[in-house]
Amino acid sequence: ILMRYFVQPKSEVRARHYDLTDDDIVAMNVMYINAKIDAAFVFSSGRNMGCFKGVGFPEDIGRFFRLDEYQAYMWTAHGRFPTNTTGWWGGAHPFSILDWAVVHNGEVSSYGKNRSYLANFGYDCTMHTDTEVIAYLFDLLVRKHGLPVEIACKAVAPPLWSQIEQMEPEDRELLRTLRITYGGALLNGPFSIVVTHAGGMIGLNDRIKLRPMVAARRGKTLYVSSEEAAIRIICESPDMIWRPEGGVPVIGRLQSAVQ
């Protein structure tokens, strides 16, 4: 019943908004519902993925959504303790749009600038917390603008200008261009984030590593967490474990997607 009020035939939407993809139309409707429909929110909209949110103890949330009955090749989890924003189910992690999902430890102090930047591209931030901008930025940079994941990471967490000036000419020109072109996408503040999508997983720290992040591997499985203890609960004996440098992404790709 609700759908008829805002979902329009694909042919009509495309006629007015150039050649939109199916993903564009889904994202547009997610933004419309979240911004225009009172007391309604969409927090999961991807293919073959699920985003589950709730307020309460993690084990209770897991039982409520019957997570033990799901199978997947990639999982993220986060137990958020609200600090700067309201504690409510819409503000619980993960944050997602289409098949992008983000969990985040820390604070995005550039939230206002990032939110205004995203509004230029049709993204409305309505969940009252800073993490939401991260999911939308990766969707914008990778899906809509077609940037490789590595370049998107450099856009949101680039080196400092003083570091860029000391680089080789080719790298210096690339980073200068990214900082100028995507200045509104730069994330400031202390953060460690895990971003997942259909093709893989990304772990990324702020540029000066004000929040911890640990990565590990066991066979062909990648683990990323803000704390080593969380990884060892899932995998007691990883083959290798390391602490990535600030601003240097850890990128895991799904094997079937690489081949």
Image (cartoon, grey):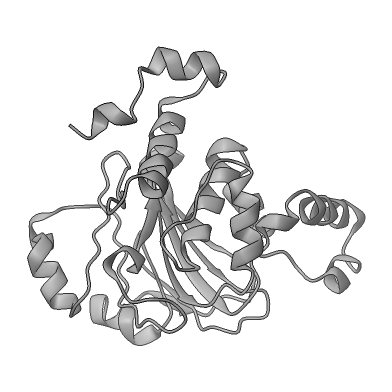
**In what quadrant of the picture does the C terminus appear?**
top left
Residue at 72 percent across and 64 percent down: it is 158
Q: Nearer the viewer, residue 109 or 208?
A: 109
Viewer-closest of 199 and 131: 131
x then y, percent, for residue 19? 54, 18
Q: Residue at x 43, y 43 (%)?
A: 31
Q: Position of residue 27 (x, y in %)?
A: 42, 38
Quadrant housing residue 248: bottom right
| Residue 194, above or below 142 | below
Measured along the vertical axis of the image, is residue 28 above or below residue 16?
below
Q: Residue at x 8, y 61 (%)?
A: 66
Q: Which residue is at a point 44% across and 57% down the rendered structure image?
A: 126
Instruction: Tell me if 86 is positioned left or right of 65 in this view.
Output: right
**Residue 28: where, in percent of width, then height?**
44, 36
Q: Residue furthest front?
A: 38
- Judge left or right: residue 123 versus residue 61: right
Image quadrant of residue 166? bottom right
Residue 52 vs 84, above or below: the answer is above
Q: Is residue 251 visible?
A: no
Looking at the image, can residue 45 be seen?
yes
Q: Position of residue 111 (x, y in %)?
A: 59, 66
